[in-house]
Structures are given as C-alpha cells and as structure tokens.
C-alpha cells in the first residue's frame, strides 16, 4: 500500500495545474463550478479552452497516441482529471470523453476509431449521451427508439429526453431498439449519429440544475457503419461503459477546492460580531464536508487503481463512495443554506448573494438524484448484485402486474 | 498509488483470522466479559508466542519490526473477533510511547517483557473533570499533579476511565508538572508500579462490560528515573501513540463492521417471514446497503492515516477524519444490524448483535468520539491557506451571468447549427 504519486505523475500534475492557473480568467468564480447552463459566451470560452487542453493532451491522456491521447496509464489520467476538477472545470464534452470514448476504443471498428476518437481527444466536438426515454428511465432496457433495417441503412423513429446539453452537440451516442426481444436487453444496439442528421429535431427541457434537451427521431436514416459494436449487444456494451465512468478523481478534487473556499468564506464573513466559523453548526458542517471529501478522494483513487489493475483484479467491488455522496448530498446542501438563514435562498444573480450564491445552487442541484440511475436503483443493484440479497425474478414481473390489475 | 495489501499482511490476516476463530469464539468473549480480569492470561501467552505483542517493535527487543499498517491488519481481526485484552493499552499506548521516548534502560527492561507477555501496562490519562468537559484527550485536561520531592516525585489525584488498570503491572501516568503556559508543555509521563499500596482501583460498570477503572493516586512516590521522555515534554510522544491507538480502534471497528455486514446480510437472506426471506424487502435491503457502505468507508481513511503515521508525516487531520467517520459509521452499522435482526438482535443471552453493539461503544468513545474529532478536523481546516486564484485575463463572462433557463445558443443549435 502506498499513497504517493510517482515523480512523473507529480510533474504532470504541476503542468496541468499551471495550465489552468494561467488559462482561466481571474474573474472565473470556481465556486460555481459544474454549472451546466452556460451562455453562448461561456460556451465559446469553454470550447476554446477545451481545444487548447486537447492540444496538450490533457483531455484524454490515457488514450493511445493514434486516438489523440498521450498514451499514459489510467493513473495519469486520474491525475489530470483531479487537477481539472480542482479548478472547477467540467469540459463541454465530458460525456464524450468519459462515456462515449472508452467503449469506442473497445467496440469500435478501426474506421470508427479513426474518425471519432481524435476529434474528442482534441476537444473539437460535443457529444450527448442519448440513452434515456420517457418509458426508459431507471429501466434502461425498455428503450423503444425504433430501428428498422432498410437496405444498407438503418432508419430510426422515436424519442429521447433529458440529454444534458452543456453546449451545441455534434454527435449523439444513442441507445436504440433493433429487435423486439425477450429479455428486452437482448435487442438493443448502440449508434453513433450526427446531431443534425435529417429527421432529428430538438426541444428544450430545462431542469432545476442542468440544461437538457429532448430529441425526436423522424425517419432518421444512417449508414450501417453508424452501428457501434455488435447488433443487439448494445446494452452489454453500455454496461462496460459504467466501469469506465467509475474512475472519477475529479469530483473529490472539485469538492476540495470548494471546501477551501468555503473555509475562507466562513473565516471572513461575520455574524453577530463573530466570524461565521465560530458557529458550532458551521463547524460541524465543515467537518462533515472534510470527511466526505477525503472519503471520496480515497474512493476515487481506489477505483482508478483497481481499474488500472483490471487484468489482474477483474471487476471492482461494489462502489460505495458514490452511494455515500448521494446519501448525504441533500443533507449537506440543506445544512449550508439553512446556516445562511434568509440569505440561503439567494441565487448568484442577486447582489446580496453570499458565497456567490453557491449554497442556493448546491441545494437546487442536489434535488437531482437521477443521473446514472436513481439512488433507489443503485441500492437495488448493490443489494442484489453486490450483497446477494434476493429479489423477485424478473420473469414474475408480468404475473405480478396482472395479479394487481385483477385485484383492482 | 497502490491499494494492495502486501503478502506479509495477507498472511498475517489469514493467521489471525484462523487463530481467533478457534480461540476467541463468541462464547469465550462472553466468559471473559463476566470474568473480573477481563482477559485470559492463557490466550495472552498464546498471542505473545505468535509475536503479536512485539509486532511493531524492533528486533533488538524481540519484536518483528513491522509497521502501523501491518498492525492495523491485525486489529481488523481483533475487531472481527471482539478480542478482549490489554493489547492497545500495553503495546500501543504505553509500549510505543516507551519505545519512542523512553531511556535505553527503560526500553531494555520493559519492551522485552511486553513482547513476552510478562508485563501489562495501562495508560492513566483521563480524569473525571476533563472527561466531563470534553477534553479528556487534551493536555489541557490533565490536572493530576506530580511534585518534585528530593529524588522523587509525588503524584496526587484521580484518573478515570483507565482501561486495564486493574490488571496492570505498570501505569503510564500522565501528570502535570508545570502550571501555566502552553498546557502541552507541562506534561510529564511517569512509570508507576501499579501495585503501589498508595493506589486504589475501582472497576467501572460500563456498556461494553470492559474493564475500565477509577484510579486514585494518593501521594504516590515515584523515583525520577521513572520519568519517560523529557520532564515537561511527555505530551508529544504520548499524542503520537494516541494517534496510533485511534487508528487501531478504527481498524478494529472496520473488522467488527465487516463481520456485522456478513451476519446481517446472511440473516436477511435466510430469515423467512410472510413466506419469503425478509431480504427481499427493499426496506431491509436499504439497511444492508447503508451498513455495507458505512463500513466500507472506514477502510481507506484508516489505512491512509496509518500510512502517514508509518512515514512519520503529519497526520492530525487524517487521524481525526478516520476516527470521526469510523465511530459514527460503526454505531450506524450496529443500528442497521439491530433493525434487520429485530427481536433476535436484542436478546442478550445468545444474540451476537448486542455483543458487537455493546462492545463497539467503548471503541467509539475511546481516544475521541465523533464530535471530539470533528472539532480537531475544523482546527486543521482553519489552517488551510486560501486557494490559489487563476491568473488569466478577466473576461467578464460570469460577472452578470443571467443564469438563463434556456441558453442563448440553443435556438441556433436547434435550427441546425
């Protein structure tokens, strides 16, 4: 066991650190990091910075050189992610980098890899993850975006929604139904689709936090090489993606920066003639944040390390840092807004806002517990797959539904 | 970064688990609880033979020269088996302090006796008032005085919650030898013959049925040569040993917690009510998930602190984080077990859950409970420097951020970019 980084890793960390220190504008309020409803001006800025980071290889350092990366290991990738998170930077194409790129490496044809990966690594594009549908939320296998084969082409009809939209998309990483199979997850495939292919239209779907969109597919025709991996194996391919998604060292780093800023705020701000930090409730809140942050930091690195050793160690044990964060995020967010009294409700646009309105924003976005599966689904998965607790076999679901219907 | 356990650590874990499963069974733990000594001299001898009393000491004293992380592996197994005995007092809190601060004579005399199992030591630090005032583990709370008298010191006062005092050969007595100034600069450690007739002991009745005592030192005369470390300089080495001790308690709570998860999940899988295993209910599943996650969160916080201590790095915040989390997480892990086991988890005669639950209480409180360590965390946070500000040209992009509901780039995008 050893919790040090190699000299090369520290050197890389310093480089990335300096890159952000020099490139980010001095008026960038990192306390608002993670805001995902950027203006045109902000989006332009992030795209430009994303390109510059891409040139340096800081977007996908773990990818091979032919894919546009630096050919480094998963651990170096973790170091870069950590520094990126520390500065409160969430790339416009973070989904392309973390969700679409890795399976493209594993399941893509040489031609697909050549075509799609370098622009992602160079920071030139934005991908949306088009998975969720009105009737396929937690039940991802229920996707019904219909695909029919027509000659050499595929034709798509249906709807997606809740696509996080940090800027205008170039491509859609799309989960769709290619066969009415039983069980349902055996008839699903993955497609790589240009965002403005004829027949695609959008509708805005703003949320309490991120800006998201709905996507409508009306006879959208794509060539057969838009298919990623094997036909009808898309659900399994997507499952592999989740293991990649787990290697996240950026979240804890972002929380670290946030805590550092919060400590300064609580030292500076006074109430009833005393610094806020002398308030016992504030002290408790800060301690909780420090504990959460460190647990997430260690958990993030454990996941990255485990992932880097996957050939030797196989699948990782059930991840718990994310579960812990989810479990407490609401309470932590509420504690901070509560401690500010009436000021806790002010958005950052108000001149009276405290701490750049971040407490309000954190509370508001903590209402979102659904990305990557609702917290409830995560618990069902941990209980079943992780701990081996029993569940009603899926084959009885229909019978149960019918029995309930009958009783009604 | 490397999160793997070494081969030696894995071997130690296997040996310890096999041995303790055989020798330190649930019924044995119950017997020892009812026994006035609170430990088994036979088992103590056996673990001395296994080398567990000298694990972290240098070879010259008969030790195995292993480190804090290795010891934590052993403590995981101690926690899992609820091993009762004065190991923490003797080996970690007292022995390690003697190793780091004692004279060569003290080390040569005492350490081999600790390693062989011949001597038991107890740390006499906490006092009635300091324990009530919330600073039992701070130098500030030490009021028992030692006053110079010729070649001796006279110790006078009462220590409370002293673990294993009633069976100790020596007390490592933490005394105030200087008033005023920084409270940490007036603390001296004395090795006191525990059988001195001027000392009286009264066992306390506690939740865990472990053996803690009130120790009344009535003008106990101790020779100067029994000072461990420097006069007025005893706090620093003791504090280091207490950090190690806190880490060991975290490891023990991790081990106990893992066992609790195993038995709780197993019970949920096998206990049938309403014609189904109760574990099919998502209320029960949620208890198990939280319990697993709580316990899992102890592991790396503990080993990270242990690693820092092994390397001699400052680790105040890491130890405080580990102990603050572990104490709370362990308490919750017990609570979830109680919920899932219901009545069976409440019966004291043959239920194992109450045993873990009660015996866990002492680990949660000892060497600092959650509120105590949270305060330590914040004291460290206050020393954080202000984070570095970026240096790029200001762009005014965030100053009047309208926080648009629908971003201004959307329309052009929706029209086809």
Image (tube, helix red, strand yellow):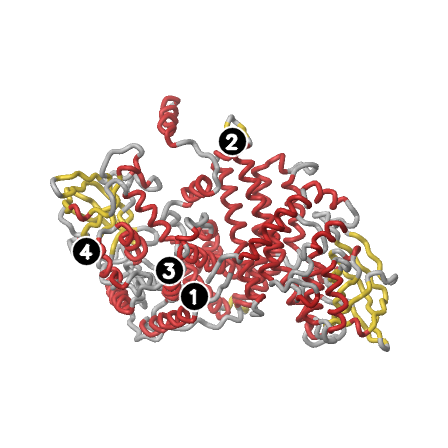
On the rendered structure, is A153 left or right of A142?
Answer: left
Q: Which residue is mark 2?
A: B277
Total numbered labels placed on residues in the image:
4
Chain at numbered mark 2: B
> CA–CA distance between discs 3 and 1?
23 Å
Element under label 4?
helix
Q: Earlier in the sequence, mark 3 or mark 1?
A: 3
On the rendered structure, is A120 left or right of B58?
Answer: left
> CA–CA distance between discs 3 and 2?
42 Å
| Front residue (pair B185, B252) | B252
Query: Between tags 1 and 4, which lies in front?
Result: 1
Query: Between tags 4 and 2, which lies in front?
Result: 2
Residues at marks 4 and 3, common chain? no
Chain at numbered mark 4: B
Element under label 3?
helix
Answer whether residue B109 is visible to the viewer in this image. yes
Q: Which residue is mark 1?
A: A257
Quadrant in the picture for residue A274 = bottom right
Q: Residues within 10 Å of mark 4 (few under 14, many from 20)?
A: some
Element under label 2?
strand
Q: Is mark 2 in CB contact (under 8 Å) with mark 1?
A: no
Q: Earlier in the sequence, mark 4 or mark 2?
A: 2
- Residue at the spot 47% in from the left edge and 34% down from the top edge: A390
Q: Residues within 10 Å of mark 2 (few under 14, many from 20)?
A: some
Q: Which residue is mark 4?
A: B413
Chain at numbered mark 1: A
> CA–CA distance between discs 2 and 1?
46 Å
Element under label 1?
helix
Q: Is mark 1 in CB contact (under 8 Å) with mark 4?
A: no
């Amino acid at each position: 066991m050893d919790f040090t980084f190699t000299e090369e890793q520290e050197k890389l960390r310093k480089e990335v650190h300096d890159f952000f220190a020099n490139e980010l504008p001095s008026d960038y309020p990192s306390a608002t990091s993670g805001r995902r409803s950027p203006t045109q001006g902000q989006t332009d800025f992030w795209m430009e910075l994303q390109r510059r980071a891409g040139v340096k290889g800081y977007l996908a350092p773990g990818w091979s050189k032919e894919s546009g990366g630096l050919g480094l290991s998963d651990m170096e990738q973790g170091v870069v992610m950590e520094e990126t998170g520390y500065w409160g930077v969430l790339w416009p194409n973070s989904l392309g980098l973390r969700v679409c790129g890795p399976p493209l490496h594993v399941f893509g044809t040489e031609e697909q890899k050549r075509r799609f990966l370098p622009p992602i690594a160079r920071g030139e594009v934005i991908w949306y993850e088009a998975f969720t549908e009105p009737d396929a939320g937690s039940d991802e296998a229920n996707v019904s975006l219909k695909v029919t084969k027509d000659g050499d082409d595929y034709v798509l009809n249906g709807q997606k929604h809740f696509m996080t939209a940090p800027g205008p998309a170039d491509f859609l990483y799309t989960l769709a139904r290619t066969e009415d199979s039983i069980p349902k997850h055996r008839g699903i495939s993955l497609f790589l689709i240009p965002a403005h292919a004829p027949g695609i239209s959008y509708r805005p779907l703003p949320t309490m936090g991120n800006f998201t969109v709905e996507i409508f597919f009306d006879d959208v025709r794509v060539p057969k090489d838009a298919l990623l991996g094997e036909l009808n194996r898309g659900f399994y391919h997507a499952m592999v993606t989740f293991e990649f998604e787990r290697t996240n060292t950026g979240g804890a780093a972002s929380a670290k920066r946030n805590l550092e800023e919060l400590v300064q705020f609580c030292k500076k701000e006074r109430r009833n003639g005393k610094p806020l930090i002398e308030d016992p409730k504030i002290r408790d809140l800060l301690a909780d944040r420090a504990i959460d942050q460190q647990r997430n930091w260690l958990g993030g690195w454990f996941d990255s390390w485990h992932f880097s050793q996957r050939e030797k160690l196989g699948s990782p044990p059930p991840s718990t840092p994310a579960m812990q964060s989810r479990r407490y995020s609401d309470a932590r967010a509420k504690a901070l807004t509560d401690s500010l009294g009436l000021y806790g409700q002010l958005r950052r646009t108000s001149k009276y806002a405290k701490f750049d309105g971040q407490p309000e924003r954190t509370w508001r976005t903590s209402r979102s517990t659904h990305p990557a599966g609702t917290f409830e689904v995560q618990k069902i998965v941990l209980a079943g797959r992780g701990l081996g607790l029993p569940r009603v076999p899926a084959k009885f679901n229909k019978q149960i539904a019918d029995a309930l219907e009958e009783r009604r | 970064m490397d999160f793997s356990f070494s081969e030696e650590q894995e071997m130690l874990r296997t040996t310890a688990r096999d041995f303790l499963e055989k020798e330190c069974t649930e019924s044995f733990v119950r017997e020892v609880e009812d026994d006035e000594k609170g430990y088994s001299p036979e088992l103590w001898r056996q673990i001395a033979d296994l080398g567990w009393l000298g694990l972290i000491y240098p070879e010259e004293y008969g030790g195995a020269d292993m480190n804090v992380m290795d010891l934590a592996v052993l403590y995981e197994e101690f926690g899992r088996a609820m091993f009762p005995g004065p190991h923490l007092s003797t080996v970690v809190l007292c022995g390690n302090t003697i190793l780091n601060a004692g004279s060569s004579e003290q080390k040569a005399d005492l350490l081999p006796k600790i390693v062989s199992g011949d001597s038991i030591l107890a740390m006499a630090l906490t006092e009635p008032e300091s324990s009530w005032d919330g600073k039992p583990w701070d130098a500030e709370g030490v009021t028992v005085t030692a006053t110079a008298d010729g070649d001796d010191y006279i110790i006078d006062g009462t220590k409370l919650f002293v673990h294993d005092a009633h069976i100790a050969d020596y007390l490592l007595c933490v005394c105030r030898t200087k008033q005023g100034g920084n409270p940490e600069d007036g603390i001296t450690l004395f090795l006191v013959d525990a059988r001195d007739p001027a000392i009286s002991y009264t066992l306390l009745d506690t939740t865990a049925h472990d053996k803690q005592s009130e120790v009344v030192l009535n003008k106990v005369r101790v020779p100067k040569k029994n000072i461990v470390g420097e006069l007025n300089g005893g706090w620093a080495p003791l504090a280091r040993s207490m950090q190690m001790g806190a880490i060991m308690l975290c490891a023990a709570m991790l081990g106990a917690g893992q066992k609790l998860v195993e038995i709780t999940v197993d019970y949920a899988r096998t206990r049938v009510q309403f014609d189904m295993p109760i574990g099919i209910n998502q209320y029960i599943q949620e208890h198990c998930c939280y319990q697993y996650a709580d316990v899992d969160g102890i592991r790396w916080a503990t080993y990270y602190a242990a690693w820092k201590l092994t390397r001699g790095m400052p680790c105040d915040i890491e130890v405080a984080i580990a102990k603050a989390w572990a104490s709370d997480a362990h308490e919750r892990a017990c609570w979830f077990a109680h919920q899932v086991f219901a009545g069976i988890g409440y019966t004291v005669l043959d239920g194992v859950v109450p045993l873990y639950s009660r015996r866990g209480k002492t680990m949660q409180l000892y060497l600092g409970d959650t509120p105590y360590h949270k305060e330590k965390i914040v004291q460290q946070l206050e020393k954080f420097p202000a984070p570095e500000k970026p240096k790029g040209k200001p762009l005014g992009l965030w100053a009047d951020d309208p926080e648009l509901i629908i971003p201004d780039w959307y329309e052009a995008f929706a029209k086809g970019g």
